């Protein structure tokens, strides 16, 4: 897909923290012959709350169309722990490889505000669809 208008956007809001995800199949980096399917995804996090939040950890749950599951936990995102004051946003891009032509991703970011209170913000479940998927759910 080259037209950004045709890329789906997924969104979730937790206590004023809005998370939007736009996945995109990377045709040029994938190799169906070698069962290698690559997606990029762009995440935008907007702080629409009254608090300043620092993103401290991430948790991803990735399931491919054959039911294989990967759990990815780590500090921050793309080597950063962004601090978002009210009204601020942060955007980053990353990627996910699968060995089947489609899958799903979901997860959670943990944010901490001054004083130590934590917020577990839901990352919306999003679909990883390639043109090589032979069966689609109805």
Image (cartoon, helix red, strand yellow):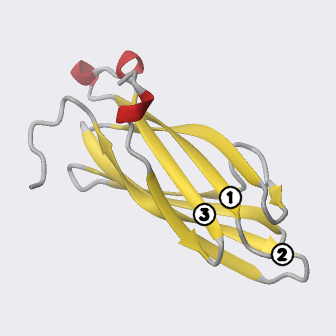
Quarter of the image for the N terminus: give it.
top left
Q: Position of residue 40 (x, y in %)?
A: 48, 34
Q: Is residue 106 left or right of residue 82?
A: left
Location of mark 1 (residue): 46
Q: Residue at x 30, y 37 (%)?
A: 99
Location of mark 2 (residue): 113
Q: Residue at x 53, y 54 (%)?
A: 20
* Dot placed on the residue nearer the N-terminal end, 3 or 2: 3
Q: Is residue 122 visible?
A: no
Q: Is residue 116 left or right of residue 66?
A: right
Label 1 close to label 3 by CB (< 8 Å): yes
In which quarter of the view is residue 138 placed? bottom left
Seen from this angle, which residue lies furthest top? 28
Distance in Å between CA atoms under marks 3 and 2? 16 Å
Q: Residues within 10 Å of mark 3 (few under 14, many from 20)?
A: many
* Dot placed on the residue nearer the N-terminal end, 1 or 3: 3
Distance in Å between CA atoms under marks 2 and 1? 15 Å
Q: Is residue 85 visible?
A: yes
Q: Residues within 10 Å of mark 2 (few under 14, many from 20)?
A: some
| Helix, strand or loop at mark 2 | strand
Q: Residue at x 40, y 33 (%)?
A: 5
């Amino acid at each position: 897909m080259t037209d950004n208008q045709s890329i789906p956007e997924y969104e979730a809001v937790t206590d004023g923290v809005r998370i939007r995800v736009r996945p995109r199949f990377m045709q040029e980096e994938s190799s169906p012959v070698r069962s290698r399917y690559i997606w990029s995804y762009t995440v935008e996090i907007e702080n629409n709350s009254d608090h300043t939040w620092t993103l401290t950890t991430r948790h991803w749950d990735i399931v491919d169309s054959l039911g294989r599951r990967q759990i990815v936990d780590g500090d921050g995102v793309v080597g950063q722990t962004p601090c978002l004051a009210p009204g601020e946003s942060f955007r980053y891009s990353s990627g996910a490889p699968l060995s089947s032509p489609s899958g799903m991703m979901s997860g959670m970011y943990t944010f901490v505000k001054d004083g130590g209170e934590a917020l577990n913000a839901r990352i919306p479940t999003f679909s990883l669809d390639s043109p090589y998927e032979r069966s689609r759910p109805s």
